[in-house]
Image (cartoon, grey):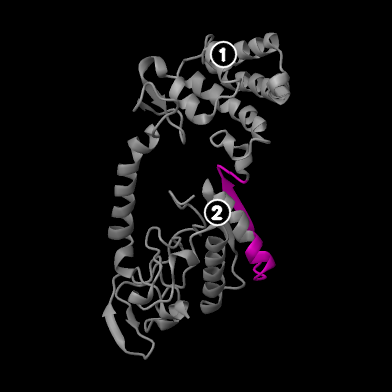
Amino acid sequence: MYRDIKMCRLGRAAQAVKGATRRDRRGRAQAQVPNAGVLSDFSSSDWSARGAYLVPAHMFVDAPGTGFGRVLGKDKGGVGKGKDVYGFDEDAHAFAQFITRYLTLNSRWNSPKFLFGESYGTTRSAMLANILENEDSVGLNGVMLLSAILSYDISVDFPQVNPGANNISYAMGLPSYAATAWYHHRLPQQPADLQAFLQQVEHFASTDYLSALMQGAQLDAATQQKVAEQLHQYTGLPSAYIVKAGLRVNGGQFAHELLGANDMVTGRLDSRYSGPAMDPMGESAKYDPMDSSISAPTVAEFNDYVRNTLHAAAAAFIDANYRQ
């Protein structure tokens, strides 16, 4: 779950007047920080230049242990431990605690509040919304979910998570397989109209294909072969391979096999990407070509923007008020 935290990014970062002076809890002036308050000012009450300070309308929040988010142990003046925040419920409660604390310290209880979650963040946004609404009485104006995964039972990437429900995951994954095969020109007959083609695939997936899957070992050989031939038309995979897989090809296997004749694999997060197969004789793709293609330049660009434009590295601190 924690390979990449993408959750609760509440809009753009706050910006403070350049050169504002920060004071400690005893009122003593500290060094001036350019663009102080960007990203991580959890309490604007400690700024002496408060009259010129722009109260943040939006706030970025890094999950503990990611980005600029840190778990402060006793060696750093805190009391936190990784086990306090690393987990489904622990993570959601940590975010809820931050949000309610931030609303109180900055008098923002009447401000609009939205959650935005992507991928794993959609699961976490659902949990966080429940905690905020039912435990902390924080009313949300909206929750936005992108690339939602609210039930791992129906993910074609992890059908083994719940064998009793995984038939649905294969049916739901079929249109994505079909679109990927269409993009890479691996279909026996290349349709001119992608949307019309996908409508046919969706209908087949929810009728004949799902029915065949539900029959399990009771499916007769003739029907299995007929369904496999249709899956070949929609995915480009050999019908013999589909039959051997019991009509059940998971995401990693599909990514490995679609371009297997050329010893290539397709991407998983964006299946338009492709790359050399790490193990041409393997069962599934060992990496995501999309990550390999864009991760380094994306991380470099983000760090340059956050550090040199927003000056977040200079202002990334955790306020003592928040630790209480």
Question: Helix, strand or loop at disc 1?
Answer: helix
Amino acid type at image mark 1: His
Q: Residue furthest front?
A: 217
Q: Nearer the viewer, residue 5 or 191?
A: 5
Which residue is denoted by mark 1 in the rendering?
Answer: 232
Q: Residue at x 33, y 75 (%)?
A: 75
Between 49 and 132, which is closer to the camera in this rendering? 132
Count the labels in the image: 2
Residue 29, position as x, y percentages in the image: 30, 86
The residue at 61%/14% (across/down) is 228
Please state the extent of the stretch shown in magenta in the rendering. Answer: 130-150
Q: Residue 34: give its label.
A: none
* Three-letter amino acid code of the residue under disc 2: Phe
Disc 2 is placed on an element classified as: strand
Which residue: 39% across, 81% down? 47
The nearer-to-camera label among 2 and 1 is 1
**Cα distance in 3D space between marks 2 and 1:** 38 Å
* Residue 137 covered by magenta stretch: yes
| Nearer to the camera, 117 or 284 | 284
Can I make out residue 264 in this image? yes
Query: Magenta span has 275?
Result: no
Q: Position of residue 191 (x, y in %)?
A: 56, 13
In this view, the residue in front, 268 or 89, is 89
Residue 49: image x %, image y %? 37, 81
Residue 51 seen in this snapshot: no
Q: Quadrant of residue 250?
A: top right
At label 1, counting other C-alpha atoms closer than 10 Å, the crowd grade (few under 14, some 14-19, many 20 or more) is: some
Question: What mark, if any, has residue 116 been given in the picture?
Answer: 2
Left or right: residue 240 compared with residue 221: left
Q: Image check: 207 left or right of 61?
A: right
